[in-house]
Image: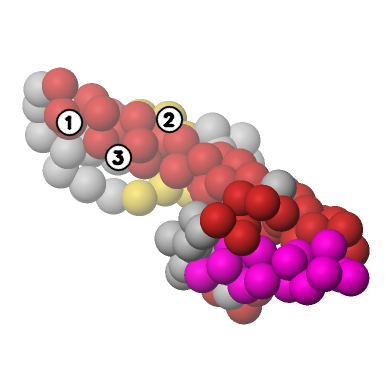
Amino acid sequence: MTDHLTEQQLTDIENRTNAATKGPWEHHPAYGPNFFANTTGLYLQGVGDLNFGVGEQARADEEFVKHAQQDVGALLAEVRRLQTQRKYLIGQLAKRDAESGAGDRAVVEFLRGETAPAAEAAL
C-alpha cells in the first residue's frame, strides 16, 4: 500500500481526539434509552439518542462508541510509532548500500509498495 496519512492528517485527527470528551463513557438510560455520557466530570457530558436498537449488532455498536475515544488515541500512537520505525529503517538501508546504489533503488521500490528483487536483496 503506497498511501499513508500525512502529518497534517494525523495532527487533525489527534486534535479532534484530544478535544472529545474523555472516557470512560457509560450508558445512562435515565436520560433516554440510548444515551451515553462521560461520568468523570462535575456533570454528564454525552450524546443523545443514538438509537442503537436491540440485538447483538446494537451491543457491538454500543461498545464501539464507548471505546472510540481511547481506541483512536491508541491508533494514533501506533501509527506514529510505525512512522518513526519506518524512517529509521529507510535510513539504515540507505546507509548500508550507499556505495552500490542498491539501497537507493530498494528504498524507492519500498516506498512504492513494490516487492522487487532489488528491494529483497537490500534486506
Question: For the residue marked with disc 3, what is the amino acid?
Answer: Phe
Contact flag, marks 3 and 2 (Cβ < 8 Å): no
Horizontal relation, residue 110 to residue 33: left or right = right
Q: Which mark is residue 26?
A: 2
Q: Along the polypeptide, which appears first: circle 1 or circle 2?
A: 2
In-front residue for pair 42/24:
24
Residue 52's x, y, as percent? Answer: 17, 38
Q: Is residue 99 magenta?
A: yes
Residue where numbered disc 1 is placed: 58
Q: Secondary structure at mark 3?
A: loop
Give the magenta-colored segment's residue range: 97-112
For the residue marked with disc 1, what is the amino acid?
Ala
- SS majority, magenta: helix
Is residue 14 visible in this depiction of the protein? no
Residue occupying image coordinates x 15% and y 29%: 57
Q: Is residue 50 left or right of residue 113?
A: left
- Numbered disc in front, either 1 or 2: 1
Q: Pick the residue in front: 12 or 80.
A: 80
User: Alpha-carbon neighbours of circle 2 within 10 Å: few (<14), some, or many (≥20)?
Assistant: some
Q: Nearer the viewer, residue 55 or 48?
A: 55
Would you name the residue on which mark 3 appears?
A: 35
**Closest to the observer: 55 or 103?**
103
Distance (Cα) linking label 3 and label 1: 13 Å
Q: Which of the two labelled residues, at mark 3 and mark 1, occupies the earlier sequence position?
A: 3
Relative to residue 6, is residue 70 depicted above or below?
above
Name the outermost residue toward the bottom: 8
Note whether 69 is above or below 10 in the view shown: above
Instruction: Judge depth for marks 3 and 1 and give the one in front.
Output: 1
How many neighbours does mark 3 have within 10 angstroms: few (below 14), some (14-19), or many (20 or more)? Answer: some
